[in-house]
Image (spheres, rainbow, N blue to C red):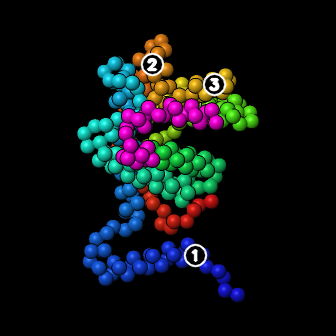
């Protein structure tokens, strides 16, 4: 009895065969780089797009902390702000495409194990984190595409309303208050995880640069992850309070949570430190765009 072939595998084989034939017959097609090279370029563009988002958000938060600009914003607010500038639609399109490239790289890492993390408990943990990151940046890319066809200010102002509507739907469910508290604790866990990574992880492990350069750029990554983790804490507290009080109006956006931080004693200085951390993370993302070890999988086969 003949074994049944995998249709997806057969399709990939057929496409690869057509590509090889086309390269042999067409000088123009021979100029197109190999798939691995294209995937590496896309990943590096993605890291650059991520760096641009965090650098923009960090600068806007810093300006807000010292009353040099308007209200504090998060990463989505930074994307909306870019859309309001000269050639804003062009910026949004380029940024959306760059973020899509980064999401594609996250898929290669999480599903196809591009970083060779393996299937141990630690490997699954790293890949799950990469998958979660991919969903988050997919949401940012969707925001950028949506702003291309809408009004940036209207989209940004609707974020709080949308968050409260979602919280109200959760509260309508059985044990909705506990579910909302759990969501807040999950956000808290995300923040703590980033802060723990800031202290424990070797961020130069994936960089292909000299020992001296790696030693110099490592503090940027630590400051960035520490700031990202700390920035989640006010939002987590507000979501937990909303669950305890069964009041969806307590829920807010990431940007509004930063404003709540600013209103605390020494708040502007805390906000400024968060901004500097975001800027550091953006700069480190640019360094990753240049020096990160990008090893696209030879075969697009999920690793389980």
In front: 100, or 169? Answer: 169
In front: 76, or 52? Answer: 76
State which region is magenta.
141-169
Report how far apart the C-alphas of labels 1 and 3 lie in the structure: 51 Å
- Residue 141, image x, y percentages: 43, 47
- Residue 78, image x, y percentages: 38, 35
First reached walking from the N terminus: tag 1 or tag 2: 1
Vertically, is 126 above or below 186? below
Q: Nearer the viewer, mark 1 or mark 3?
A: 3
First reached walking from the N terminus: tag 2 or tag 3: 3
Quarter of the image with the N terminus in it? bottom right
The answer to whether residue 206 is visible is: no
Q: Main secondary structure of the magenta part?
A: helix
Find disc 1 in the rendering and name its residue: 7
Vertically, is 107 above or below 74? below
Find disc 2 in the rendering and name its residue: 262
Report how far apart the C-alphas of labels 2 and 3 lie in the structure: 23 Å
In front: 239, or 9? Answer: 239
């Amino acid at each position: 009895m003949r074994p049944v072939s995998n249709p997806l595998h057969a399709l990939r084989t057929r496409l690869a065969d057509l590509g090889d034939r086309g390269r042999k017959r067409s000088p123009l097609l021979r100029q197109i780089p190999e798939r691995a090279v294209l995937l590496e370029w896309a990943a590096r563009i993605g890291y650059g797009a991520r760096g641009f988002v965090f650098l923009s958000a960090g600068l806007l938060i810093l300006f807000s902390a010292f009353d040099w600009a308007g209200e504090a914003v998060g990463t989505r607010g930074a994307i909306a702000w870019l859309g309001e500038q000269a050639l804003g639609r062009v910026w949004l399109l380029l940024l959306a495409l760059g973020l899509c490239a980064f999401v594609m790289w996250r898929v290669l890492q999480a599903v196809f194990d591009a970083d060779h993390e393996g299937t141990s408990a630690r490997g699954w943990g790293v890949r799950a984190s990469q998958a979660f990151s991919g969903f988050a940046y997919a949401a940012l890319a969707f925001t950028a595409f949506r702003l291309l066809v809408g009004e940036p200010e209207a989209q940004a102002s609707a974020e709080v309303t949308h968050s409260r509507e979602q919280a109200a739907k959760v509260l309508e469910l059985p044990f909705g208050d506990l579910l909302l508290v759990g969501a807040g604790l999950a956000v808290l866990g995300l923040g703590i995880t980033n802060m723990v990574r800031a202290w424990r992880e070797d961020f130069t492990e994936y960089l292909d640069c000299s020992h001296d350069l790696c030693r110099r750029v490592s503090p940027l990554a630590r400051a960035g992850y520490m700031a990202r983790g700390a920035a989640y804490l006010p939002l987590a507290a507000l979501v937990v309070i909303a669950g305890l009080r069964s009041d969806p109006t307590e829920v807010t956006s990431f940007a509004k949570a930063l404003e709540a931080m600013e209103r605390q004693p020494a708040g502007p200085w805390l906000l400024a430190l968060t901004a500097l951390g975001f800027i550091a993370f953006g700069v480190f993302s640019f360094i990753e765009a240049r020096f990160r070890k990008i090893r696209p999988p030879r075969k697009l086969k999920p690793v389980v």
